Image (spheres, grey):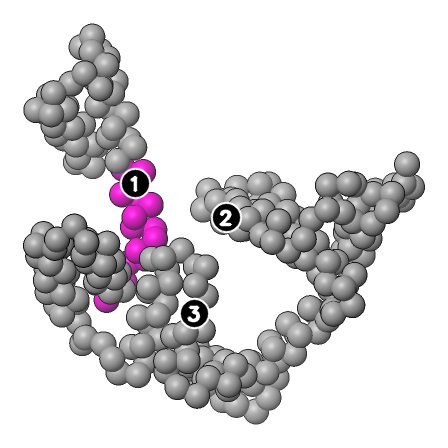
Amino acid sequence: MVSFPVKEKYNMDDFRAIISVLRHPGGCPWDMEQDHHSIRRNFIEETYEACEAIDTENTELLLEELGDVMMQVLFHASIEEDAGRFDIDDVADHAVKKLIFRHPHVFGSVQVSGTGEVLNNWDELKRKEKQQRSYTDTLNAVAKTLPALWRAEKVQKKAAKSGFDWPDEHGPLQKVREETDEVASAVPSETFEEIGDLLFAVVNLARKLGVDPEDALNGATNKFITRFSRVEVAARSGGTEIEHLSQTEMEDLWQGAKKLEESHYE
């Protein structure tokens, strides 16, 4: 049994200490077996759970989920500390120095007129910091592990800074129409690529309209689930399981669910 101090309130030093206890002899066998790759997915899942707490404005849940995200950060840093490469203090040192460097309007003599100029300066300083010598370098630097819609949007935004962009939404809208036609006429071997081109074009249209494509798709998915539920309930109330409906019957119930939904907004 490991002795750990009992306190009324713990702090970050205690958090760091308990991760170290868990990961070393006498601690938890599972924790001692993990490496960066084995807990990579945990990091992603904990981050998304924190985001859900933000979306639902659940402060109590956010408190818990931020702790889970911090635990992942401390865990990864502890692995590196054992390897002798860096520790959590080095992480903090790097982050603080980066914030000072990227906020010359706060910690230096640079004058800014507003948020827009702050963001422009941030991008320019980031390019210098990362030694990105071309716009292509900035596109390649966008994390490939981002959700595909967000990655596409971020790449498009960075490309737009070079002037490679349409002046308004009409260009992207026409591009969506072109890509839709190409999907319709594609042979099976080309469908994968053409669907990708269509999705990329839709993201570009969303960007020009100021719509977050990830949020929009999540909204559409939630709407689909709600309507599907109504169709299933309606089918069962008529004495039929949804899988036994004909296509026509299913479409009729779908349109009924849609009208019911629209009536709620009137």
Up-down relation of residue 160 to residue 152 (above or below)? below
- Between the residue at mark 3 and the residue at mark 2, the CA separation in whole angstroms equals 19 Å
Q: Which mark is residue 221?
A: 1
Give the residue type that dot 1 points to.
Thr
Give the residue type that dot 2 points to.
Tyr
Is tag 3's residue or tag 2's residue first in the polypeptide sequence? 2
Percent coordinates x, y for residue 244 in the rendering: 18, 16
- Neighbour tally class for label 2: few under 14, some 14-19, many 20 plus, Cα within 10 Å: some
Quick check: 251 left or right of 59? left
Residue name at image x 12 percent, y 53 percent? 187
Magenta span of residues: 208-223
Q: Nearer the viewer, mark 3 or mark 2?
A: 3
Circle 3 residue: 142
Q: Are marks 3 and 2 in contact (CB under 8 Å)?
A: no
Residue name at image x 16 percent, y 28 percent? 254
Percent coordinates x, y for residue 51 in the rendering: 49, 49
- Neighbour tally class for label 1: few under 14, some 14-19, many 20 plus, Cα within 10 Å: few
- Secondary structure of the residue carrying numbered label 1: helix
As rendered, which of 6 and 81 lies closer to the eye?
81
- Secondary structure of the residue carrying numbered label 2: helix
- Neighbour tally class for label 3: few under 14, some 14-19, many 20 plus, Cα within 10 Å: some
Give the residue type that dot 3 points to.
Val
Tell me which secondary structure the magenta stretch mostly adopts: helix
Circle 2 residue: 48
